[in-house]
Image: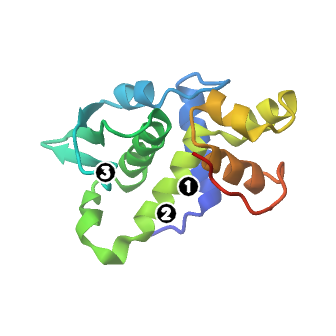
Amino acid sequence: MALVTYVQYREQAETLAQEFGYVEPPVDVRAIAKGLGIEIIEMTLPNWFFGVLVNIKDEFYISLNKGMPDHRKNFTIAHEIAHHQLHGEELAYMKNVKRDYFHREADVYAAELCMPSEMVRAEAKKWCGDYRFLAKIFSVSETAMVRKLQELRILRNIPYECRN
């Protein structure tokens, strides 16, 4: 089994966004899911449950908690697309504690899919790194955008407190 790094996951996610023609924000993860043949089903679910990718007879579905805010839905869809792209046949990860790293891999991929690095760099230059505005145009949470800007060294690593 080849060793794959987070850098490679980010490259794969950015490539997927480009393949679907996204060169400026927001990246429409619903359209990408549809293009990959993944149907999204929104349901009333407990607050703690965000979503899950399900494979039923080689047809893929994302079950999504419809009570979440749109930015949370976008990231959850991207996270489940990541499982589809990275983990394929190994979708039994949910019941195997030895595969907790699958979720971290999916988070790295999802962040890049929602906020492709080159796109964030370009938009941050236009908007002087205004993380609140950038979060809105990328349809992500402010916390996710701050983390991305810190990762790209556009925003210093200062304590950030999420505001509702």
What residue would you read off at disc 3? 47
Q: Is residue 108 left or right of residue 120?
A: left
Up the image or down, 127 lies above or below 141; here it is: above
Determine the image quadrant of residue 17: top right
Q: CA distance from mark 1 to mark 3?
A: 23 Å
Which of the labelled discs sits on residue 10, or is there none? none
The amino acid type, in three-letter code, at marker 3 is Asn
Determine the image quadrant of residue 116: top right
Residue occupying the point 58% across, 42% down: 141
Mark nearest the camera among 2 and 3 is 3
Dot 1 or dot 3: first in sequence order is 3
* Residue 32 location (% of width, % of height): 44, 29
What residue would you read off at disc 1? 108
* Residue 77 location (% of width, % of height): 40, 40
Quarter containing the C terminus: top right
The amino acid type, in three-letter code, at marker 1 is Val
Q: Are marks 2 and 1 in contact (CB under 8 Å)?
A: yes
The amino acid type, in three-letter code, at marker 2 is Arg
Residue furthest bottom in the image: 98
Dot 2 or dot 3: first in sequence order is 3
Q: Is residue 91 left or right of residue 26?
A: left
Quarter containing the N terminus: bottom left
For the residue carrying disc 2, how many other residues have a C-alpha within 10 Å: few (<14), some (14-19), or many (20+)?
few
What residue would you read off at disc 2? 104
Residue occupying the point 56% across, 55% down: 108
For the residue carrying disc 1, how many other residues have a C-alpha within 10 Å: few (<14), some (14-19), or many (20+)?
some
Between 126 and 163, the one nearer to me in the picture:
163
